[in-house]
Amino acid sequence: MLSDQELLEEAAERQAKLAAVKEVQVRVRFPDNTQATWKIHPDHTGEFLHNAVRAVMALTHSAGVDVAIEAVGVPATFDVCQGIVGPGGRIANIGVHGKSVELHLERLWSHNITLTTRLVDTVTTPMLLKLALSGRLQPLKLVTHRFRLDEAMKAYDTFGSAARERALKVVLKNA
């Protein structure tokens, strides 16, 4: 069990990492392979996020998207996902959050959405391997950084600073 001082130090470290984030890139891909991309900076206001959501809704003729994937782990990108998910849609939250987010049930409850959260573990690994081997899942498209096994600590640091390093998924290879 951590001491009070250790807990305070961990909290300060998490806060410093969040303060170091200079921008977050939000990209929405559509079935016809078109996409919309925004770079969100700490000084952007709620109006900026509102305009991003409005743009996606315009592109989908107000239907929203079937799947919104939150892979960054910051409140702003989770808010965008909540704003663009359509009725019956899914928010797949795979980002590692270091801070609480607000869940807008006042809007989402009537949309019958599904919200999933999960890290890769022994339950999901067999299914993910089957999907990858069948070609239905293309995980290499998510890899942004590769490291040798002897660079594991550098890889961990990169993933720990994912927003600053623009790291989505990090791969270790034994070669």
Image (cartoon, rainbow, N blue to C red):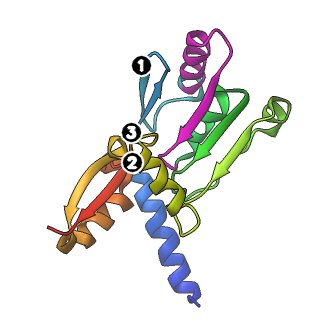
Q: Which mark is on residue 23?
A: 3
Q: Residue at x 59, y 85 (%)?
A: 4
What separation in Å lies between label 3 and label 1 (alpha carbons)? 24 Å
- Viewer-nearest of labels 3 and 1? 1
Residue 120: say if magenta.
no
The picture quadrant where one finds residue 91 is top right
Region in magenta? 49-73
User: Residue at coordinates 81% horizontally, 39% vertically from top-left?
Assistant: 105
Quarter of the image where one finds residue 149: bottom left
Q: Residue 75, position in %: x, y?
A: 58, 45
- Quarter holding the C terminus is bottom left
Q: Which residue is mark 2?
A: 21
Looking at the rendered structure, which numbered label has been put on residue 33?
1
Q: Where does residue 15 sit, x and y in percent of width and height?
A: 48, 61
Q: Which x, y percent locates residue 108?
A: 78, 34
Tag in front: 2 or 1: 1
